Image: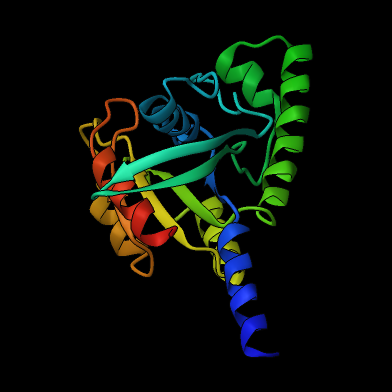
Amino acid sequence: MGFFDSILRGISRLFKKRQASIGIYGPPNAGKTTLANRISRDWTGRSMGKTSEVPHETRKAKERKEVVIKAAGNKISFDIIDTPGIATKIDFHNFVEEFKMDEEKAKTRAKEATEGVIEAIKWLDKVDGVLLVMDSAEDPFNQVNVTLLGNLEARNLPTIIVANKMDIDDASPATIRDAFPQHPTIPISALAGYGMDNLYKAMMKYFR
């Protein structure tokens, strides 16, 4: 390749730079959609999805394109993807017994939730980085967290662990940080907005 060809190729890369896609992942009810809503509202004024105490409220991935985040004197535009909660087992009986859902609706929710897990895994082929949301009041050593991290590491996807629910009294982000020291851990409350400035700074650093 000649000198001028090299210059043209470099210029082409600059003008064809792709928008970075960031997937929000984690187990059900860790606060993924609450975080997606917080990020989207902070920078676009719009929410992304509905939240609920019933697991698997988000059963289809939702994408918000060109979310321009500003932090530390810089700004970057991201595509944010809120993915369905990852679970190793989804049983419609749980919706019936724990949340008093009628059987037909419970079976439909379980089926859609299972399809959502498959869709979320497929999205890993498209994203450039991951915000892995964990409930900081729960034991981080569960099958979903460990399996997800192994998958992300195998794909060499930049990952920030988001230790969510800092507004809960027994929250312990240090437990998450100690469990997975190979990844940056940012304590936040997506619901209350605590720690979001630190998360935005980390996104600027690790997802550039």
Most foreground residue, 161 or 2: 2
Residue closest to the eye, 205 or 188: 205
Residue, x 34% and y 59% (percent of image)? Answer: 205
Q: Which residue is more in the foreground, 41 or 146?
A: 41
Residue 107 in the image: x percent, y percent?
A: 77, 21
Give coordinates of residue 170: x percent, y percent: 23, 37
Residue ranking furthest to the bottom? 2
Choose between 72 and 162: the one closer to the eye.
72
Q: Is residue 82 left or right of residue 123?
A: left
Q: Is residue 170 left or right of residue 32?
A: left
Q: Residue at x 47, y 20 (%)?
A: 46
Could you tell me which quadrant the N terminus lies in? bottom right
To which quarter of the image does residue 143 belong?
A: bottom right
In the rendered view, would you say 114 is above or below 154?
A: above
| Residue 105 percent across, percent down from the top left | 74, 13
Q: Residue at horizontal 38%, vertical 64%?
A: 183
Task: Name the image quarter holding the C terminus.
Answer: bottom left
Vertical order, 103 against 200 (above or below):
above
Count of numbered marks: 0
Q: Can residue 130 be seen from the camera position used here?
A: yes
Determine whether, in the image, residue 56 is placed left or right of residue 74: right
**Residue extending farthest front:** 4
- Residue 140 seen in this snapshot: no
Image coloring type: rainbow
Instruction: Please name the residue shown 47% across and 32% down the image.
Output: 36
User: As drawn, is 18 to the left or to the right of 29?
Assistant: right
